[in-house]
Amino acid sequence: MKKDIDEIAKELAHGLSLEQLRERQRGGVMFNGERKEPTEEQLGKIAAYLEEVRNPRPPDETKARAFRMAMPYEEARRKFWAVLQMRAAAIEVFTEQPFRWEFDETEQEAIRDLLRYFINDPESKRPLFKGVFLYGAVGTGKTEIMQAFHRFCENEGLEKAFKFSSMSKTYTDAKTNKDFDPVSENVTSDRLFDEFGRYSGAVLNFGESVDINEIIIEQRYERWKRYGQLSHFIANATPNDLGDMFSPMIYDRLREMCFSVLLPGKSKRK
């Protein structure tokens, strides 16, 4: 249970209330009519407490998530490639046509960056405490790649294992079922949102008009700041294009809690 400020203050200052802390900041504390100066140790704890209240630390400096490297990069590369090959075999069965992955050097670099990110490799070029905003043209394989990372993380029991959500399905369900709750499940767990930005605008949710994209981002932003919860997005639109879809505050929060990765190339759909 979250403690209020007075409880935290008392723990840090040996039972003193917040008002007594403020009095102490003014130069001393009154005990039975006598003013007593705080010790150096007490002053240090008070200063640390006030700094924490006034300037909350960003997620990368908190102890909410301790990102530890899961395995050597070469081991991760072999295992992830095996997942891709299994997916290629499944695509062949589904389409009844031969299929093989073909990535140019730019695409390979983007995938290598993501692999280092998901295993928490300290050599990653990406901030480990932020989520992924993966974008690119239609059909470039964005969803397939992230599904492969989803399976890879689950197979290896990685800290960055995440759940999958389709924003298209969420919006469709919300518009066709007045009792559908599009928010509660989508603000839990590390989660990836596919087809993000394809639908926008308000829908009726239990009689109230809400913008699903915005309310999910708002709530997940608060959980990211508080607990380090990660949010990933797949979109055809660029991050700048999304600026026209959301309020400035929501757009800024999306950019703050994610880093952008372009998956270049042409459509792989035939």
Image (tube, helix red, strand yellow):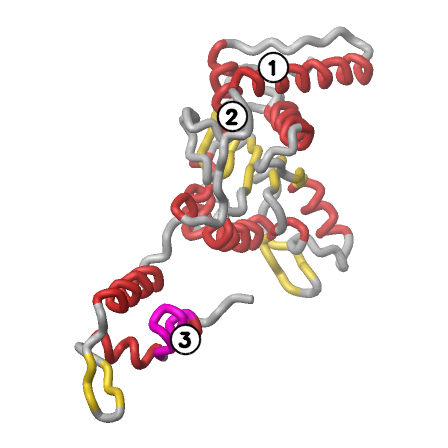
Q: CA distance from mark 1 to mark 2?
A: 14 Å
* In the image, residue 79 above or below residue 249: above
Residue type marked 1: Arg
Q: Residues within 10 Å of mark 2 (few under 14, many from 20)?
A: many
First in residue order: circle 2 vs circle 3: 3
Image quadrant in which the N terminus is located:
bottom right
Q: Position of residue 160 (x, y in %)?
A: 57, 36
Q: Residues within 10 Å of mark 3 (few under 14, many from 20)?
A: some
Q: Position of residue 218 (x, y in %)?
A: 51, 54
Residue drawn at (62%, 36%), measured in percent from left and top? 161
Q: Position of residue 68 (x, y in %)?
A: 49, 35
* In the image, residue 83 above or below residue 163: above
The residue range painted magenta reads 8-16
Taking depth in this image into account, of 11 and 266 the one nearest to the observer is 11
Q: Which one is closest to the eye, mark 1 or mark 2? A: 1
Q: Which residue is mark 2?
A: 114
Residue type marked 2: Leu
Q: Which residue is mark 1?
A: 78
Image quadrant in which the C terminus is located:
top right
**Residue 73 in view, yes or no:** yes
Q: Which residue is mark 3?
A: 6
Secondary structure beneath label 3: helix
First in residue order: circle 1 vs circle 2: 1
Taking depth in this image into account, of 197 and 220 the one nearest to the observer is 220
Secondary structure beneath label 1: helix
Residue drawn at (29%, 76%), measured in percent from left and top? 21
Q: CA distance from mark 2 to mark 3?
A: 43 Å
